[in-house]
Image (cartoon, rainbow, N blue to C red):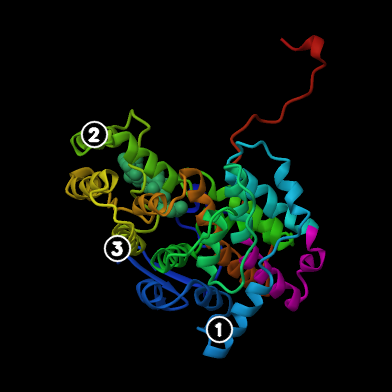
């Protein structure tokens, strides 16, 4: 007869204490370890953000250098992983490959699965951050039938990633620094977002003592859904489906119609009841990328901006406090960078890995941590007696 609160979707339940990320959804504020996302995205880089999320402080110059060195040391994945990729159908969704490959890492790095050792926990964290770009780029290369490109440790994190995705052996590849910077900023924006569905999944998996690779694979699986990380893919598909500005009102009406399952993808958020601060930076990054690539008047960007304008003036969206979220402009930006929609959630997973691992580490190191075990309200049949099948009516 234990007493507990029924809270479907955990809308009013805090599952943990955390010092990592702060969100004020009404004010539209996001802080990583106290630093506003705008300042980090503008002035910092992704690996520095990783350090901040993992250790709680920004690195000194020397700490930054050492951290970059240890991450680059781990960028290769075991050569045998090649064969793991080859087992997937050639048209496999890169998220399916990603879920499988990350789960498989625990079979390659046995030493890192000892979670009681702080040193091993740190190596596992660094391995995850370092190997995700390689795993993600290889999932992409496999899905388009191109040879894998090995990491280059003399390049920055994001420049190396773009190279692993877009270079081919028959041509010289030069990283465009503006695009690499945009990629890095996109990673910063996705790095952590406190107790969202995938992060809570990682914590729940980790609460049983499971190894970090298995926990991150669980997070990736959760992220895949269209209500979460899959929304960037869904948002771009939606903009393509709308196609031109004159059709926007029709789709806004559909989004408001409760008998129609259609929702405006990239709109609304459980926590933000104001403009998602990440969406603003993403919109700016989107303009920068398009300008760098000389893409003028991208019809999808026009549809997106007009849709945003109309929705923000529509009573339904105003009343329900539905604003664009990070996924609204990320699809257009990623597409301009050269990624197909199937890669969007993979990029999200790559960046969120640091948040997952920082949250996992915080949880494992928290002495008050217990296995996660929600209760339920049972609404099934009352006690009844078993009957042999011949006697069942
Ligand atoms: N279009 C139309 N109506 C919406 C939308 C939308 N995008 N989002 C919410 N609503 C309505 C919803 O129908 C509900 O109306 P009512 O109160 O009349 O039933 C009300 O607004 C509250 O919505 P909810 O579904 O109860 O809110 P939630 O906190 O459970 O859902 C959400 C949050 C993000 C899942 C939802 O807003 C949504 O489905 N948005 C579209 C998908 C999306 O963009 N997801 C990305 C989120 S940000 C990145 C990430 O988390 O990965």
Name which of mark 3 and mark 1 comes first in the sequence.
1
Mark 3, Cα crowd under 10 Å, few <14 / some 14-19 / many 20+, is: some
| x and y percentages locating residue 27 in the rendered image | 30, 67
The residue wearing badge 3 is 284
Q: Which quadrant of the view contains residue 261? A: top left
| x and y percentages locating residue 269 in the rendered image | 37, 53
Name which of mark 2 and mark 1 comes first in the sequence.
1
* Placement of 315 over or under 251, stated as above or below: below
Mark 2, Cα crowd under 10 Å, few <14 / some 14-19 / many 20+, is: some
The residue wearing badge 1 is 64
Is residue 214 shown left or right of residue 310?
right
Secondary structure of the residue carrying numbered label 1: helix
Q: Which quadrant of the view contains residue 366? A: bottom right
* Placement of 263 over or under 352, stated as above or below: above
| Residue 268 painted magenta | no
Count of numbered tags: 3
Res. 90 in view: yes
Q: Nearer the viewer, mark 2 or mark 3?
A: 3
Q: Is the residue marked 3 within 8 Å of ligand 1, measured from its CB?
A: no
The residue wearing badge 2 is 253
């Amino acid at each position: 007869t234990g007493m507990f609160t029924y809270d479907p979707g955990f809308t009013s339940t805090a599952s943990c204490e955390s010092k990592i990320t702060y969100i004020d959804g009404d004010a539209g504020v996001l802080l990583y370890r106290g630093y506003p996302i705008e300042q980090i995205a503008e002035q910092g880089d992704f690996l520095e953000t990783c350090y901040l999320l993992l250790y709680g402080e920004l690195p000194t110059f020397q700490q930054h250098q050492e951290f970059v060195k240890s991450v680059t040391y781990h960028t290769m994945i075991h050569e045998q992983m090649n064969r793991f990729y080859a087992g997937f159908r050639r048209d496999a969704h890169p998220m399916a490959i990603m879920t499988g490959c990350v789960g498989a890492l625990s079979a390659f790095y046995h030493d890192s699965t000892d979670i009681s050792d702080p040193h091993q926990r740190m190596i596992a964290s660094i391995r995850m951050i370092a190997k995700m770009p390689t795993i993600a780029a290889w999932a992409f290369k496999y899905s388009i039938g191109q040879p894998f490109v090995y990491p280059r440790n003399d390049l920055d994190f994001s420049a190396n990633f773009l190279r692993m995705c877009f270079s081919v052996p028959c041509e010289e590849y030069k990283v465009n620094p503006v695009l690499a910077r945009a990629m890095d900023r996109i990673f910063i924006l996705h790095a952590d977002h406190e107790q969202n569905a995938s992060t809570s999944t990682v914590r729940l998996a980790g609460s049983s003592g499971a190894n970090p690779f298995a926990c991150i694979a669980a997070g990736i699986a959760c992220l895949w859904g269209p209500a979460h990380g899959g929304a960037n893919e869904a948002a771009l598909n939606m903009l393509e489906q709308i196609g031109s500005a004159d059709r926007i009102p029709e789709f806004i009406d559909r989004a408001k119609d409760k008998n129609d399952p259609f929702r405006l993808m990239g709109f609304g958020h459980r926590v933000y009841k104001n403009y998602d601060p990440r969406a603003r930076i993403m919109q700016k990054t989107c303009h920068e990328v398009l300008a760098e690539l000389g893409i003028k008047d991208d019809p999808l960007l026009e549809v997106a901006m007009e849709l945003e304008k109309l929705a923000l003036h529509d009573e339904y969206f105003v009343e329900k406090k539905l604003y664009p979220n990070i996924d609204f402009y990320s699809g257009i930006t990623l597409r301009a960078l050269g990624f197909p929609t199937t890669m969007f959630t993979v990029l999200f997973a790559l960046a969120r890995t640091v948040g997952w691992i920082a949250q996992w580490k915080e949880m494992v190191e928290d002495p008050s941590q217990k296995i996660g075990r929600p209760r339920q309200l049972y609404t099934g049949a009352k006690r009844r007696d078993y009957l042999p099948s011949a006697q069942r009516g």
